[in-house]
Image (tube, rainbow, N blue to C red):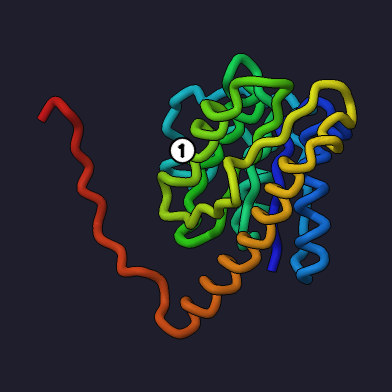
Amino acid sequence: MKVLLLNGSPRPDGNTSVALDEMIKVFEAEGIDTEVYNIGVKSVRGCMACGQCAALGKCVFNDAVNEVAAKFENADGIVLASPVYYASANGTLISLLDRLFFSSSFDKTMKVGASVVVARRGGCSSTFDGLNKYLMNCGMAVATSQYWNSVHGREKGEAEQDAEGLQTMRVLARNMCFLMRSIALGKEKYGLPEKEAWQPTHFIR
């Protein structure tokens, strides 16, 4: 099994990495493969609503979005991690996630996802909520922990002092392992849930 961890911080060795590293220790101890993709250091444009992904099955811009999509498709779980910027996720990560979840055509049903946020002080809850919305719009299973998945720290390495935050990361990783394994066993015995044809509506008709 494999987990893809997206680090939205422009500081690959900052406090967001501290949180992810705590999860990776658990994954490795549990025999789960991991890959960290540092998206915060890249330049990713937002979606331009061209609609080409409907025909291509992927984004028309062959950049980090399609690279991450291929890794996501082959993973059993994904972690979306970001520092808090004005009570929201890093803009580069948001641009990637908007395009990734809209343009990719592979089935995400029952892949396991989790969101992790890191802040000096405030804005964690709204950032956490925003990231979770990507996971909850495509049939994924969302892993939880003993508390909302946040770690605190401003200066480099300060997150290492957040004992409860790091414990929350460890519990989250263990719960992800359990969910991924349970879903794999369930798929083997029962298959995935039955799908219905989409019935698109909007508020005008």
* Percent coordinates x, y for residue 76 in the rendering: 61, 62
Q: How many marks can you see?
A: 1
Residue furthest to the left:
205
Q: Quadrant of the C terminus?
A: top left
- Depth order, front residue of 140/48: 140
Q: Residue at x 56, y 34 (%)?
A: 128
Q: Residue at x 72, y 40 (%)?
A: 165
The amino acid at mark 1 is Lys
Q: Relative to 76, does residue 190 appear above or below in the rendering?
A: below
Q: Residue at x 55, y 57 (%)?
A: 112
- Depth order, front residue of 150/55: 150
Tell me if residue 103 can be seen.
no
Tag 1 residue:
133
* Percent coordinates x, y for residue 196 in the rendering: 25, 61
* Percent coordinates x, y for residue 193 in the rendering: 35, 69
- Depth order, front residue of 204/6: 6
Residue 121 located left or right of residue 114: right
Q: Quadrant of the N terminus?
A: bottom right
Q: Relative to 38, does residue 88 appear above or below in the rendering?
A: above
Q: Residue at x 42, y 77 (%)?
A: 191
Residue 149 located left or right of residue 193: right
Residue furthest to the top:
86
Tell me if residue 170 can be seen.
yes
Residue furthest to the front:
164
Helix, strand or loop at disc 1?
helix
Q: Residues within 10 Å of mark 1 (few under 14, many from 20)?
A: few
Q: Relative to 163, does residue 70 appear above or below in the rendering?
A: below
| Image quadrant in which you'd find residue 155 | top right
